[in-house]
Image: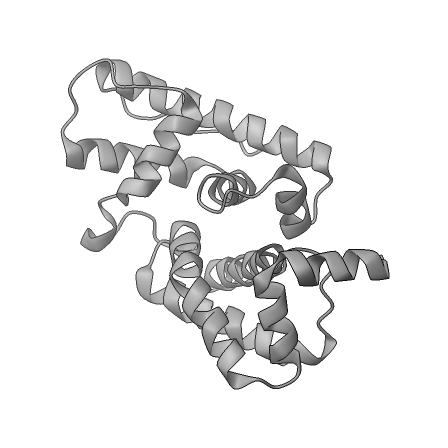
Amino acid sequence: MATSDTSLQDYKLCDPDVQLMLRVRDDDALAFEELVQRYQNRLVSILQHLVRKREQAEDLAQEVFLRVYRARKNYQPQAKFSTWLFTIANNVAKNAKRSLARRREVNIANEAQEADAPPALEQMALAASGLMPARQLDKSERAEMVRLAMERLNERQRMALLLSKFENMSYVEIADAMDLSVQATKSLLCRARESLHTLLEPYMQDGSSPAEASDD
């Protein structure tokens, strides 16, 4: 859908990252470097929660930036820059997971470095589920429980939660990034929170292993 001149001007004025990307469109290498510095760690963090491996997440972040650079000449600010960027990241992550599945290389929970969920993820998952521990939990035990619960969310629920909690995106922005309607996004986030609650509650109460979440 074409964006009005007024909307384009609003994005240019209100989003400094859009201004940087417009400079990238004009082949400003320093502007591109600045965007990479601003978003690299955030991208890697999101992608790591989706593909599990830090090294792969870093590689995929490079692929995202490569796509951004290749698309620079056709760039039009029809949304916040971060929304456009995470739309690309979502597509890159989905393609990578499909490729791994085809090669049968997906292996959940198999590396020691992935045994601990990052603190931010742990806090996000607990907050999203609305649960607090009813008993004292060992830190590593709780991290493993949260990692398992997040892993058992389906891909779309996990991505929506990550964009909501880590990137503070609105329903509209998440809808744009994931190619969904706003109402579908609200429903998706609602189901994701309910799934987390279902997964986490038995463990938080008495140490029972998280149950499998549904794939809807």
User: Percent x, y for residue 139?
Assistant: 16, 33
Residue depicted at 38% across the width and 61% down the height: 41
Residue 55: percent from the left, percent from the top?
Answer: 32, 66
Horizontally, residue 36 falls left or right of residue 177, namely: left
Q: Which image quadrant for residue 150?
A: top left
Furthest-front residue in this view = 13
Quadrant location, the C terminus: top right
**Position of the N terminus by quadrant:** bottom right
Q: Residue 200, image x and y in percent?
A: 35, 24
**Where on the picture, by quarter, is residue 26?**
bottom right
Please, is residue 196 above or below residue 10 in the view? above
Residue at image coords 24%, 13%: 134
Q: Which is nearer the eye, 46 or 102? A: 46
Displayed quadrant of residue 104: bottom left
Locate residue 72, reporting x and y percent: 65, 77
- The residue at 56%/27% (across/down) is 191
Residue 35 in view: yes
